[in-house]
Amino acid sequence: MPLSVAAIFSVLLIMTGVSKLRRPTDTARALAQMGLPAPRATTLSVAILEMIIGLTALATGSEWALMAQAGIYALFLGWVATALLRGIPMTSCGCLGRDDTPPYWGHVILDGLGVVASIGAAVAGPAIVPWGLAVVASIFVVILGAWLAWEILGTGARAASLSS
């Protein structure tokens, strides 16, 4: 997969899936607060789906995997925007498997970037990445970008909840 913002969102999807597997309670609670069924199997299924889509998009860079990634980010965008617009009091959006990450508008923006980046990468198609130092630099940038996105979700949510 070419070095792209879409790869950052693939890694972020893997990370959020792993966190939901480790701590599914917050995601189940967020589902219930939105009025959706929240059995443990649903939460675990969402987590596994996130990891499969993220891994497939990252490993193959295929158009269908990137479009699936765009689709899941569009669902997340809709989820968080709905919670915010309806004023649903949540201690967690369920994304990070932590109870201190309430939905906030920065999350909506980040999800929107995930949609745009994933569609852009799908439309652009795969590119050949030269081996060597460029690959090492690419991996570093993707991991750094995913970590920064994770921090934006968590720290931004906590900061937004303190200011309201």
Image (cartoon, helix red, strand yellow):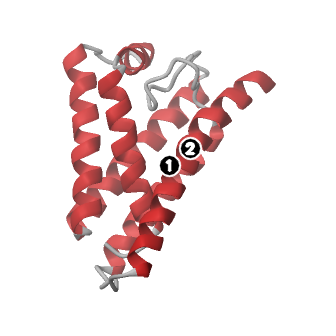
Would you place residue 28 above or below residue 57 in this image? Answer: above
Residue 22 locus on image (x, y percent) = 33, 23
Circle on res. 108: 2
Residues at marks 2 and 1, CA–CA distance in whole angstroms: 5 Å
Would you place residue 10 above or below residue 4 in this image? Answer: above
Q: Nearer the viewer, residue 82 or 6?
A: 6
The residue at 32%/54% (across/down) is 69
Quadrant location of the C terminus? Answer: top right
Q: Quadrant of residue 25?
A: top left
Residue 164 visible:
no
Q: Secondary structure at mark 1?
A: helix
Residue 74 locus on image (x, y percent) = 41, 48
The residue at 67%/27% (across/down) is 158
On the picture, is 52 further left or further right than 105?
left
Q: Secondary structure at mark 2?
A: helix
Circle on res. 111: 1
Residue 106 locus on image (x, y percent) = 64, 43
Residue 146 locus on image (x, y percent) = 49, 52
